[in-house]
Image: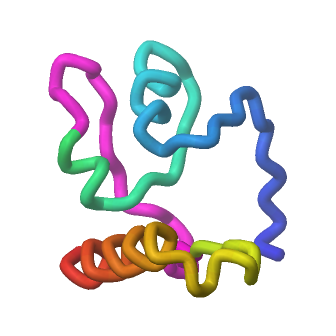
Amino acid sequence: MLGIEPDVQVVTENFLTVPGLVAGSDRVALLQRRLVDRIPVELGVRALPCPVDVAPLVEAIWWHPLYDDDPEHRYLRDLLTRVAGRV
């Protein structure tokens, strides 16, 4: 929509691996501020403001309806909800 065509070189399923994939390369990445603030200085990764507005990151969980009343599954969902509420 902004006329930007990314040149995707690496794909990962975990934001925590991104700093290591960017360090020592000419790659760029978008990361959450809380994660950027924890990148070790030794990696030599620079943090710059994002030049465009980015929509908020939305986290979600899905499960099969079979587990709606499962006590262990309900415990995990409640735990995730409480932890996410603190962040």
Q: Is residue 23 above or below residue 68?
A: above
Residue 3 point in image, percent of width and height: 83, 66
Magenta stretch containing residue 47, yes or no?
yes
For the point 19% across and 79% down, the residue is 86
Residue 13 point in image, percent of width and height: 62, 42
Main SS, magenta residues: loop
Splitting the image into 4 quarters, where does residue 76 fall?
bottom left
For the point 83% across and 52% down, the residue is 5
Splitting the image into 4 quarters, where does residue 40 fall?
top left
Quarter of the image with the C terminus is: bottom left
Quarter of the image with the N terminus is: bottom right
Q: Is residue 23 above or below residue 66?
A: above
For the point 48% across and 34% down, the residue is 18
For the point 77% across and 36% down, the residue is 8
- Residue 54 visible in the current orientation: no
For the record, the magenta segment spans 39-60
- Judged from this view, the residue extending furthest toward the top is 24
- Of 68 and 37, nearer the camera is 68
- Residue 18 visible in the current orientation: yes
| Left or right for 16, reference 44 | right
Splitting the image into 4 quarters, where does residue 47 fall?
top left
- Of 8 and 62, nearer the camera is 62
Residue 30 point in image, percent of width and height: 51, 52
Residue 15 point in image, percent of width and height: 48, 44
- Of 49 and 36, nearer the camera is 36
Q: Is residue 23 above or below residue 70?
A: above
